[in-house]
Image (tube, coloured by chain):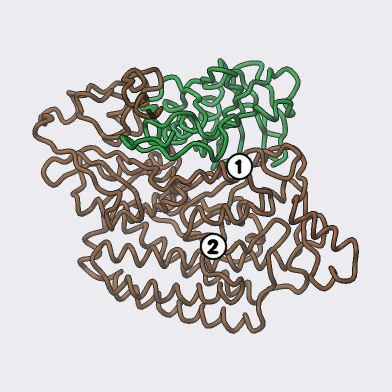
Amino acid sequence: MSDFTRVAERPERLTGETSEGAQELTRRSDTPSDQLGREVGAVLRLDGVTLDPRQVDYERHDDETMIINMGPAHPSTHGVLRLMLELDGEFVLRTKNVIGYLHTGMEKTGETLSYVQGGTNVTRMDYLSPVINELAYSLTVEKLLGVEIPERATWIRMLMSELNRVSSHLVWMATNGMDLGSTSMMIYGLRERELILAFFEKTTGLRLNLNFIRPGGVAADLPDGWEDDVDVICNTIDERTYEYDQLLTGQPIFRNRLIGVGAITAEEALALGLTGPLLRSTGVPWDLRRTMPYLAYDRVDFDVIVGTYGDNFDRYAIRLNEIRESIRIIRQCVEQMPKGDYRSQDPKVTPPPRARIDESMEALIHHFKLFTEGFQVPAGEVYSAVESPRGEIGCYIVADGGPKPYRIHVRAPSFTNLQAMPLLMRGASVSDAITMISTVDPVLGEVDR
Amino acid sequence: MIPLPPLAPPGVLTDEALACDVACFPTREQYVELVAAFRDDGFEMCLDVCGVDYLEHFDRYVPEGVTRTRFEVVVNLLSLSKRQRVRIRVQAGNDAPRVETLFHVYPGSEAPERETFDMFGILFDGHPDLTRILMPEDWEGHPLRKDYSVGHVPIQFKEAPGPR
């Protein structure tokens, strides 16, 4: 009847060259050594050393351990992350991430949307930091086009990205508190985030998927009185970070749950390609805003927060202090915000103002062309990256000279960061496993795209 | 312009790409050796591995001497110490695209390579666990290929009766 049953009945597909077999964790006696090495969290291995499945935890046999599923609907998995864990009693031996439950083919969709429409697509990937996704996308398109954006647009972009970084870290503080049993933190984190979302709504009309940063500038100028709004946000959140300190940082139970748990070294982090707070917690001072500046980050004053031990507490402290640093940047944005255009005046990229359409034939034509066909982008390929709250988010676009990207790929930080799970989990207890997921801070919309 | 690392295999073609970083065009045989040479030269991180299907844009610009193939694997490396990026584009083949895995050079390339396999059907020789990562395990076809059309394939789930 259907083509589908035939596929399921063809066992050779499962054992074929591509080994399109199960994505699940299998018994260790059935697992090849390379894969087993990954699942137990072995990252730095000498060349030529192979693991014998029977040698790993040799005192434990298959029938003494238990393979369990965590997720994809577990409340602490931050979405639909599914982890398969091999447990020995209360302790984790092997871990495997099973992802793809939120895969919606956004990269494929991106190929069918024009460059004008593309922003609405990328903004939905990392739903906690939409502005920064749009920024990565817009910078890439602008690099292909060779368009210069006005000074004010640059600063508005910076203001919005930092507000977004604060709101994303606040959600992290909230959910991390929730995972560790501090439900008050959950409420406080989301309460503060509400201030920022209200400002987003006032500026862009939307709270979450803004499509505010577009190729050529930003969608709208800041509303009247924005300085006061931002000032209130900065003062309130800055003050409340000290309340979080009182609530969490010095709290003995909280500290015991985090300090020394899930430690990784800088070598491991680099080998796995981890970025963002995960990398900085190991003591590597790598923040793209400082090391490879984009926008006007080289003209503001801020500190890159770096940890020492690479454990969960360092990651917590980094995120908390990054909120403070972001607020420092936001205050400088308010002070230094230049006057002028908020988007490029190139009529090929930017739609004409509404009033011009009534008067000018050219404006009408440009408007019509821009929203039916979009603009042509010269052939080429570009990768550009910005620092998102979770690490380096990069956008790789191949253009073929037409109005739609030929290929759009987003390098999602959470996708790569999730590879650290087996390493972090090894030897931890199940209750710490939840902390580990939380401090890696995956956003599944971005992992699965 | 970044000079090639000292241990790079001879004859690798480079080209300055738009993004002010270098694109290298190794052959499939030179590929892993070149990436390992970059790693030893201070490129600590492999940020990304992705594929491109050039079926409808076959005549893209490549430097002279590179044989174009339909599939390309694009690797982005980053050097923290030099603050540089380098992009490696390897021509992976036409009908049965395959390259060697980078897993033994950069363990962090495991998941992105699985994604590339899942989306394009490019095989990575020596990869420890080359299964589908985003699509269901019994999905047919590789969605990001240009001859995989959007929209007409119904959603497939295990054991569900298909509408076809």
Residue to which mark 1 is pinned: A408
- Total labels drawn: 2
Instruction: Please state if A11 lies on the left or on the right of A152 as rendered.
Output: left
Helix, strand or loop at mark 2: loop
Depicted B18 relative to depicted A247: above or below: above
What residue is shown at x 52% (from left), y 22% (from top)? Answer: B32
Q: In this structure image, what is the colour of chain B? A: green
Can the viewer see residue A427 in this picture? yes
Residue B93's image quarter?
A: top right
Residue A134 x %, y %: 60, 56
Q: Residues within 10 Å of mark 1 (few under 14, many from 20)?
A: many
For disc 2, the chain is: A
Q: Nearer the viewer, residue B31 or A181?
A: A181
Q: Nearer the viewer, residue A44 or A229?
A: A229
Residue A209 badge: 2
Q: Amino acid at mark 2?
A: Asn
Residue A292 x %, y %: 61, 50
What residue is shown at x 62% (from left), y 38% (from top)? Answer: A407
Residue B69 x %, y %: 64, 20
The chain assigned the colour brown in the figure is A
Q: Residues within 10 Å of mark 2 (few under 14, many from 20)?
A: many
CB atoms of marks 2 and 1 within 8 Å: no
Instruction: Please state if B45 lies on the left or on the right of B128 as rendered.
Output: right
